[in-house]
Amino acid sequence: MPAFFLELFSEEIPARLQQRGAETLARLIAEALAPLMPGVPTLFWGPRRIALAVEVRGEVAARESAERGPRLSAPEAALGGFLRKHGAVREDLVAEGDYWVLRRTIPGQSAAEVIAGAMPGLLWRFPWPKSMRWGGKSGFTWVRPLRRILALLDGEVVRFDLRQGEDDGHGLVSGNETEGHRFMAPGAFAVHGAEAWQNTLRERFVIADPAERRRLIEDGIARVAQAKGLSVVPDEGLLEEVTGLVEWPVALLGTIDAAFMDLPPEVRQVSMRVNQRYFALRDADGAPAPHFAFIANIAAEDEGAAIIAGNERVLRARLSDARHFYDLDRRVRLESRVEGLKAVTFHAKLGTQYERAQRLARLAGLLLPMVKDSSAPEDPFNIDKGYAERAGLLAKADLTTGMVGEFPELQGVMGYYYARHDGEHNEIALAIRDHYLPKSGSDPVPPMNYAARAVALADKIDQLAGFFAIGEKPTGAGDPYALRRAALGIIQIIRKFALEFFSLREALEQAAQGLGIAVPIDDIITFVVERLRVQLRSEGGRHDVLAAVFAASADDNIFRLLARAFLITRFLASDNGANLLVAYRRAANILRIEDRKDGPHTGQVKQSLFKTDEEPALFRTLVDFEKRAGLGASYQSESWLGQIVHDLALLRPPIDAFFEKVTVNDPDPALRRNRLRLLSRIRDTMNRFADFSLIEG
């Protein structure tokens, strides 16, 4: 099949938009050239180009088309509009039923004709998140000024231009030329296919494949670091961004002035990352190293000496600024900054950060008894209550510092360093640092002290309670206050530390009291459990079992919900569990059909109506099980539930025997009704532990 290759060469494209731009191009091409494209395109993206290579069919065969038009009774104007839209005349129409139908034979087209016809419109409507206008009078826009369009079909140029009426489309026409490295190999050159394009670009100091560029960057910084006995601090985001900034990656190593090595390592790392795209390094002991790695976009004749010197000079200026903020911030104690939070609005309807700090201090102290894990011997309430309240009060104080104003990424981190500088207890400082964690659903939860757990949970619960109370819930269109992330954070902390005493409802009730407004607690619990279900699904876990367990009783204890789901999952994996589920479904299906005929079959089962041995045997087993389970009372204990799940297996033999020997729909209406009531009791008893109808598979 012919090979189609398209490259769109422009000024520098922001790194974060390159891959998305290439994927959008592939989607639009696939839609526009659907009759031609049986395969999946290969995509390329980089600082100055996005490109696509794909095999296509040589032509589109002639075909018949039928387009239904206006009703026969429609006015002439409507009919005229339909004809103009399709470039047809009245004689092309035929009447079918109540409508005019346009039937036409569309002649076959070569691949080049289809591509040339589709490309101008595709490029004019290309949906970049942000587009630019540039010189000239054309209304054509692109993410950055578009300079060249390279379009080849089996080595031949596919001819088209971007002219639309009087708009000259910046005079852009398709051709077979592109450009190499801006400085190392300037000027245009011609290519005749995707492979030649890649090879020639490489000769002209451009690595077209983003995966190869990324690998070269990763290997390069590791190599220069290793030469000094150092290792690179992993930073996938920075690696991805740098891949989008350079065409010919050359790894270099710089030195950090010793005068800045007493700054917190996070400050150096963030300053290097945000301002300069430098990689932080560690020494053999894991301590921050006085060096940094970076990627130049050029192979210099002096092996990069001048580039390194220039970057070290720039870094000194950046770190001097950081030093200024650090020294200035430490002149004011963190606790003195709490008052300044009165000038920082959290949300117009939820007050200031000062009010939030007061709420967090109170809530963290109240939550402390619930953050103890089952294996901890000591009572955290007697150890950390003061620490938790103090950390809650100071948690947001660093928002008023110059360093956090310059680098918002350092929220919490700077609070930790300033708290240590002020002589606050280490547990308080750590809680201030860690209370934002985990920052994303994929973040691991680091070891936390009790105060840190309490403040982290208080922060997220206050956030959920507040925004749900004012109606700012997440929607399908967005989650501007990151409430899904807050819910996942709560779940991760509970799972990580096995917080079996943590009651989500009680925590939300306390948060509502602090807010002084009505909070839809049930909605929030359902929201959090739904996030847990989604998380389990992403982990390959039995999210359907969790949904079944939650449906049976809307438990607000995440730890207990998971424990019950685990026990039910394990039970269902056994032969007894699998067969009991089959029996449950059989009973539920019979009841669903028979209930439609004559209503729900609830009520007392009459032993006097038993006619077979299997009926009383099943009834006695069921009653014994209900007594052992104590179904009249709510259950709390995990060990109790484990025993009950074990006992559920005892129901299987009599149920199997019942279905094997007994005809449920007996001709005698009284026997039939009594047997249906027995099935109904089985179903309802099992549903007390989990709604088995929600279990998949």
Image (spheres, grey):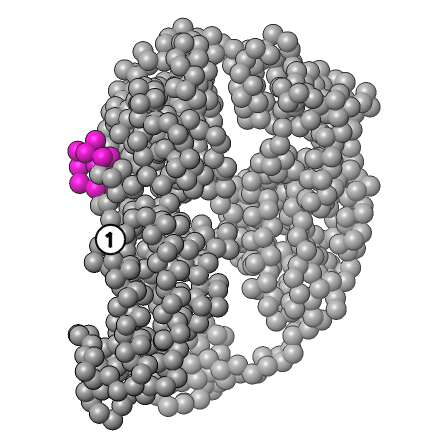
Q: Judge by depth and name the residue closer to the eye, 38 or 123.
A: 38
Going by the numbered disc 1, the residue's amino acid type is Ser
Give left or right: position of 466 versus 48: left
Q: Quadrant of residue 46?
A: top right
Q: Judge by depth and name the residue closer to the eye, 357 or 321.
A: 357
Magenta-drawn segment: 510-519
User: Against 402, is 475 above or below?
Assistant: below
Q: Name the residue under label 1.
A: 634
Whether residue 516 appears in magenta in the rendering, the answer is yes
Counting from the top left corner in percent of width and height, residue 174 is at 68, 54
User: Against 290, is 12 above or below?
Assistant: below
Counting from the top left corner in percent of width and height, residue 677 is at 23, 77
Q: Residue at x 40, y 60 (%)?
A: 646
Counting from the top left corner in percent of width and height, residue 187 is at 76, 39
Residue 592 visible at all? no
Whether residue 392 appears in magenta in the rendering, the answer is no
Q: In which quarter of the image is residue 607?
A: bottom left
